Amino acid sequence: MKSPWMWLVIFALITPLFSLLFGAANLSATDVAVCLFSDCHDEISKVIFWDIRFPRVAVGFLVGAALSLAGATLQNVTRNGLADPYLFGVVSGAGLGAAIATVFINNVLRVPTDAKGEAFAIALPLAAFLGALLAVSLVLILARTTFGRKVEHMLLAGVAVSFMLSALSHFILYVGDPFAANQVVFWLMGSLARAEVWYAWVMLPIVAICMSLLLLFGPQIDALLLGDENALTLGVNVKYLRVLCLTICAGLTACVVAYCGGIGFVGLMIPHIVRNWIGVTSRALLLGSALFGGIFMVLVDVFARVAIDGQEIPIGIITSAIGSVFFLLAMKQRG
């Protein structure tokens, strides 16, 4: 095993365990070890560990992996290092779908309070995925009809779609019920505060299937880096592959937004770091991005929990603050 991979795997195993020590309540390393490998000493420790800490770490790692996979795929498919689910309109589309579902369930269906959990569990992921597909479709249409047929213009189309769908989301929140709107606004900031164990069980197969498909098409995605014409000469169905990859990215992003809200710029930063550290071929980039993205998100969540006593910073605010600086540096480097 090469050195970068060895360190990456080690950190991917250690970081989640290390993050279980941090939070509002004090749990020692002994308490964490006992709860993880045996029965907790008391009921309070059991609730803190299994109902709060462990779900956040598991979901956080999957969120980082999913967003990083989507970002790495978008950058390779569009041959643009600045591509990202947040800038590509996918997050805004998924957020619009989830906002519509939230307001609809609260205001139109009048679902009883005790049944809202089940309703949201079904409606949110589906609505977010449909919204993400809408964003992808609009980007493809605009890139071909308005901005021109060059793949580099897809990023411009994504920015336009992102602003448009964000405006629609804000309008829906403005005319919706104030209580529901308040829920959605906090959720759109991105947070792992409401993470539950079943979130991880829903996200795990989605991330695993999407990652397997992307790894399967790794050589074809590498061919796209040579240009569409060269990829065609190598026997790659460029149009089909690009639409398939964008759909997979929509599914990954919708999965994250549905349960954790809008967490931006992770898909922009992580692939750049991994590309410089491990390599540029798609399979290495995708595997490295998934591991490094999970590590990054777990660490950011720890900072969100402990930065301010008695309060928690929405994780999307932290990633956007870091990502905006990274975006400017990337633009400067690219000239």
Image: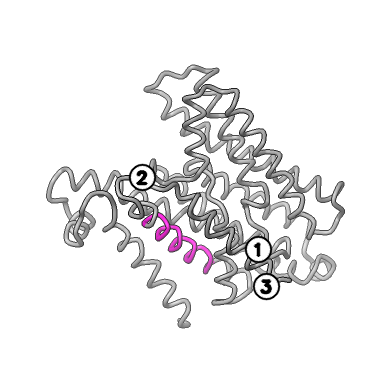
Q: Where 224 sits versus 133, above or below?
A: below
Q: Which mark is residue 24?
A: none
Q: SS for tag 1? A: loop
**Residue that badge 1 annotates:** 217
**Residue that badge 3 annotates:** 333
- Earlier residue among tags 3 and 1: 1
Residue found at the far left of this picture = 41
Q: SS for tag 2? A: helix
Mark 3 in CB contact with mark 1 (< 8 angstroms): no
Span highlighted in magenta in the image: 287-302
50 magenta-colored:
no
Distance between mark 3 and mark 1 Cα atoms: 30 Å
Q: Residues within 10 Å of mark 2 (few under 14, many from 20)?
A: some
Amino acid type, residue under disc 2 in the picture:
Val
Q: In which quarter of the image is residue 75?
A: bottom right
Colour setup of the view: one colour
Q: Residue 231 location in percent, x, y?
A: 79, 68
Q: Residue 21 location in percent, x, y?
A: 26, 58
Quarter of the picture containing the C terminus is bottom right
**Residue that badge 2 annotates:** 197
Of helix, strand and loop, which mostly describes the magenta segment?
helix
292 magenta-colored:
yes
Distance between mark 2 and mark 1 Cα atoms: 31 Å
Q: Which of marks 2 and 1 is in front?
A: 2
Amino acid type, residue under disc 1 in the picture:
Phe
